[in-house]
Image (tube, coloured by chain):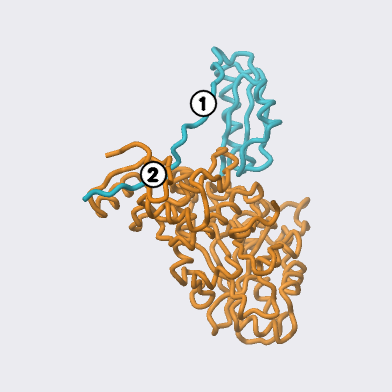
Chain colours: A orange, B cyan
Amino acid sequence: MDAGPVADYNQGVQFQARTLEAVDDDTVQQLYRERGWTDGLPVVAPTPARVEAMLAYGGFTPDQVIGVELVKQRALTAEKVAINAVLAGCLPPDFPVVTAAIEAMCKEEFLVHGATASTGGCAVLLVVNGPIRRQLAMSSTFSVLAGPDRASVCIGRAVRLVLRNLLEVRPGELDRSTLGHPGKLSWCLAEDEEGGAPWLPLGAERGIPDEVSSVTAFAASAPRQIMNEWTTDPVELLTTVVAEIKATMLHYSIWSGNYAVVLPPQIRAVLHEAGWSKADVRRFVYEHAVVRRSDWERVGKAAVVNDRNRDFEYRALPSPDHLLVIAAGGEAGGFVAVIPPWLGPKSAATTAAIGVCIDC
Amino acid sequence: MSMTVLDPSFEEAAVAVVLPQRPRSLAGATVGFISNGKQGTKGFFAHLERLLRDEWGVAEVVYRTKSNYSAPAETSLINEAAGWAAAFAGIGD
């Protein structure tokens, strides 16, 4: 059933990947399931023509290295990433987002090996900014944390299949998550830039020029939803957010790192009305999300509190800039999602421009 | 009509590594423990040290902890381990 390398498809693209022959789509599904190449859902057959179209859209050559996973020293080529993008259901215009996400995840400070292997069981959350959101018809509103549109679902799934097939991040293999969470299947959202004035988009805050699209990768625990629709005071509103962050620090991990907060329009309206910028939100959370070691005593963790450390203070954020403030969500509802990091500072959120090189 | 599809997995061969020879005996040897820093390694390594000293005649046990339990050991630690007769890596949660 296996054959050698494929040569000379439509545009003369030569692939290095091994080929397989299948009599029909049912056989393709069976082949990929049996080899552990799917997440359990059906896949789109990665024919040479489909993979070639994926590569052509972004002007990639098959052997172009998108990123190198540093622990295994494993180069992830455009050809292999494209095959997985086809499998995931991506369309060619999605592909530059997928490659930028892989580029972001391969930055040393993201520590993709640790984040995807850890018992902590985080998922990779992707936040897309810029004009490409509109080109791909990505939705930033209803059910935004749960795959609100085709592109978001397929891009997030493509990243998961890259991890699975190119880095062996499969449950019980490299993926040693004790529990994991549903975001691991696919987790991608587009920020609501239009509804967010006067707020800066996340990409712009992280150094991406105007009119350049970007993707930010964040090794993220499961989202916690809080509710406060009984105030128009930003301080009260953000006090509820801070309470959730402090609870996470006590119940999960006390170590500081990136956190994300996803703020829907009803919440943003309160903040805008009071003239609060994203920077104001970050400053407030930085200053108030603080717990003491002795607080662990009341949540069953007295064993790791002693007289020497009981008065130590711990901040959720090493600096205000470690809070990712994301505008997204359905128009009604006084809810906010707090998304904690995988584990404190071990992985940093990273951002890559889509389709352009900013610093080369 | 059959269709041709492409393999999505990583296909390049792993870089070959030459393994050092196993020690013939641990009697009088210095061995090292590399902990990932988690609580669960303490009891495990304490028990292992007793076994190595009492039953295998190990002379010295060096305890080291990785600086980041989610990343490989740092180069300085790997270089130090090269001087041990054997290294034991433990993961504890």
State whether discs 1 and 2 lie on one chain.
no
Q: Is residue A242 visible?
A: yes
Separation of disc 1 and disc 2 at Cα? 32 Å
What crowding class fits label 1: few (fewer than 14 Cα within 10 Å), some (14-19), or many (20 or more)? few
In depth, the one of A38 and A183 nearer the eye is A38
Name above or below for residue A28 compared with residue A201. above
- Disc 1 designates what residue? B16
Q: Mark on residue B30?
A: none
Can you give x and y, in whole percent of width and height, for residue B65 in the image? 67, 36
Please name whichever residue, A315 or A169, is drawn nearer the observer in this view of the structure: A169
Residue at horizontal 74%, vertical 59%?
A: A318
SS assignment at label 1? loop
Q: Which residue is mark 2?
A: A8
Of residues A95 and A192, which is closer to you in this image? A95
**Residue shown at the point (43%, 40%) measured from the top left:** A16
Mark 2 Cα shell of 10 Å, populated few (<14), some (14-19), many (≥20)? few
Horizontal relation, residue A259 to residue A280: left or right = left
Type of the residue with mark 2: Asp
State which chain disc 2 sits on: A
